[in-house]
Image: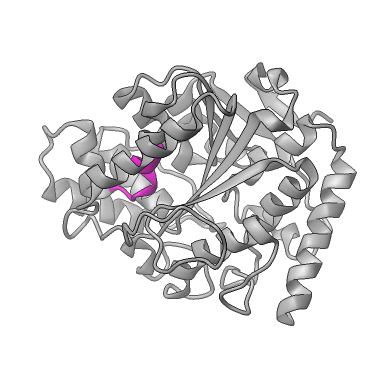
Amino acid sequence: MAILHGNKIYSEIKDRNSILFILLAGTTEISKIRGISAAGETPELTALTPVLDSEIIWSGKCISYDVVPMTENGIPTPSIITRAAIEASRIETLIVDAGLVEDPKIPFMKTGLGPALNGSERTALPDYDRALEFGKYIGGLIDGRYRYIFIAESVPGGTTTAYSVLSSLGIMDMTSSSMKDSPDSMKREIAMKVLERIDKKAGVEEKIRETGDYMMPVALGISSAVKNSSIFFSGGTQMATVLYLDSLVNGGKNRYVFTTGYIMKDKKDLMEKLAGDRIIYSTTDFTGMRGLEYYEEGYVKEGTGFGAAFGIAHILGNDSKSIYNSIGKVYRRLAGSTGK
């Protein structure tokens, strides 16, 4: 069975040295609303998930806390998959602070933006302009140095901020969720409060400022400065939203979404509405793999760009069996180090 599907741009990728994988890690006050995000065992712990995801992807272990980030049902973070695939492909990675609550104990680029606020109550991104400029700075550094730039996210509550931004732009299709049963009514309630508060005639960037998360302007800033490389927004409906916003703000040339088969099964219509034919996705099968088998039941459909990371590892010559073996090793290593 084929692993990669969609736009064939991926067939151009031959050399690992031409690739940079970026994780934009941040938080939003939205994630503290009980029931809105499964990216943590409790709403309070969701804020730490991006810190630990950053450490796992960079180092292969949790450093700041002796715990593997999991849902309240005990389903492990997809950063395990991302780390394993990156180990297999040996590509360069960059961790960027896109609104972290605290610093991960690894090398990373710090912005000091702090968490995004709750856009249903007040302006979500008071430092939008600074976030955008920081993204432009990063984009200027990497443009042309890497031919293929993959931008992933770890932002609990990010599908809700994505839905709110899309709603403000007149797209009411529901975004995906890390839960099997998406909290759609809660997302709609938050978005309706946003729409009541903001100026409906405001421009695109103003609407992102009012209701988004900091991952968005950092990603848009990177894209605006990158002229000589292709960018793959790596994730589900969150990153497809970023591609759509990028097309409105920056023009979106040589921009794609790289996602998972789980997302395409769940939200194909929205993905195509936002990204058209610029979608690539990888299919995975975690049946029988401890913890990860729940992904096959509709949990954790994307996150930390694991669909893209898995696809890159495959493109660079790793067969599926070796990638799955690498995932198992990373999971056992993490579980053993934390006593899980």
Specify the farthest residue to the bottom: 339
Q: Principal SS element in the magenta part?
A: helix
Placement of 146 over or under 96, stated as above or below: above
Placement of 42 over or under 193, stated as above or below: below
Quadrant position of residue 334: bottom right
Residue 103 appears at what percent x and percent y? 46, 66
**In the image, is 326 to the left or to the right of 78?**
right
Give the total number of marks visible in the rendering: 0
- Which image quadrant: the N terminus? top right
**In the image, is 138 to the left or to the right of 169?**
right
Q: 263 or 70, which is in the foreground?
A: 70
Q: Is residue 22 visible?
A: yes
Look at the image and say whether residue 37 sits in the magenta stretch: no
Identified at 64% across, 71% down, the residue is: 68
Residue 194 appears at what percent x and percent y? 20, 50
**In the image, is 216 to the left or to the right of 92?**
left
Identified at 56% across, 32% down, the residue is: 149
Residue 313 appears at what percent x and percent y? 76, 38
Q: 277 or 185, which is in the foreground?
A: 277
Quadrant position of residue 208: top left
Q: 54 or 45, which is in the foreground?
A: 54
Identified at 46% across, 52% down, the residue is: 109
Placement of 298 over or under 245, stated as above or below: below
Q: Is residue 289 visible?
A: no
- Which image quadrant: the C terminus? bottom right
Residue 35 appears at what percent x and percent y? 42, 67
The residue range painted magenta reads: 212-219
**In the image, is 339 to the left or to the right of 62?**
right
